[in-house]
Image (cartoon, rainbow, N blue to C red):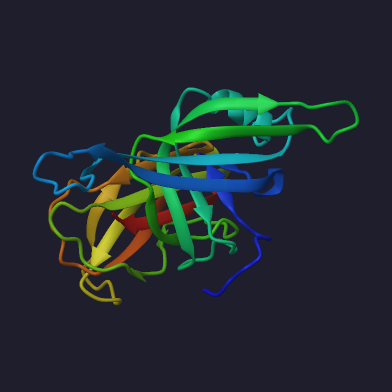
Amino acid sequence: MSKTILTNVRTFAAGLDLTGNSNKIEISSEVEDKDATNYGSQGWKEVLGGLGSAELAAEGQWEAGDPSKVDDASWTHLGSVIPWSASANNGAAVGDLAYFLAALRADYKLFDAVGEIAPWSGTAKSSWPLVRGQFAHPPGTARTATGTGTGLNLGAITAGKRLYAALHVLSVAGTAVPTITARVESSVDNTFAAPTTRATFTAATAVGGQILRTDGTAITDTWWRVAWTISGTTPSFLFVGSLGIR
């Protein structure tokens, strides 16, 4: 990816698509530097890496009056740990670069001076590591039946590393309790001839988000995808999936 002007950063908070209500997204990650200087440090300061943390800060235009609006969702999320996924100035297509994490919606600020477009701003502070991965399912493709997504060559997982997966259910339609149960599958190659389920999300019947990770054991499979089972009468779901190894 070459140098770019930020014009299309897609951001998803649980089941909310913030793209049309945000004009600034900042993601940061750091590791504490703990002073380990001693008499054997030969006159130079010596540091060790301590606890890691990450933060997503966002701001944009305020709207309210519907669960899909930023104000309604912000009040619902405030004080809760939810999944966040943000693009790197792309349309969140399968294979596009994604940054995602589980983070506490820590604060919410709104309104300004007379004559200004009503703004909002807020931050989310990490409960899990910030993951650099790829989008595994796009936001604009409606799913009405059980199926599988496109495979991604994310690579094998060494011991101590984990596969992280975020799911953002953006809309739900249908009758007789439309339900989607998404899962993450791996395979030795891109044919997925004998896929293995590595993580399964809780069945979802409403807009919302979930995030999962594997247990830290090594996995030699190198290909990964999102799959889903859908039930109900005339069901239709819009959702986003993000996958990455950290």
Task: Using the rendered image of the protein, determine whether residue 80 is visible from the camera's viewpoint.
Answer: yes
Q: Residue at x 32, y 51 (%)?
A: 164
Task: Using the rendered image of the protein, determine whether residue 233 is visible from the camera's viewpoint.
Answer: no
Q: Residue 233: x and y, percent?
A: 53, 45
Q: Residue at x 47, y 56 (%)?
A: 145
Q: Is residue 221 above or below residue 15?
A: below
Q: Is residue 237 above or below residue 149?
A: above
Q: Is 104 left or right of 76, judged from the image as shown?
A: left
Q: Residue 146 is drawn in which quadrant? A: bottom left
Q: Is 11 left or right of 97, judged from the image as shown?
A: right
Q: Is 121 left or right of 45, judged from the image as shown?
A: right
Q: Is residue 35 above or below residue 87?
A: above
* Viewer-side residue, 122 vs 211: 122
Say how many tags the image has. Answer: 0
Q: Residue 7: x and y, percent?
A: 68, 60
Q: Residue 209: x and y, percent?
A: 46, 39
Q: Residue at x 35, y 63 (%)?
A: 225
* Viewer-side residue, 18 vs 198: 18
Q: Residue 173: x and y, percent?
A: 59, 43
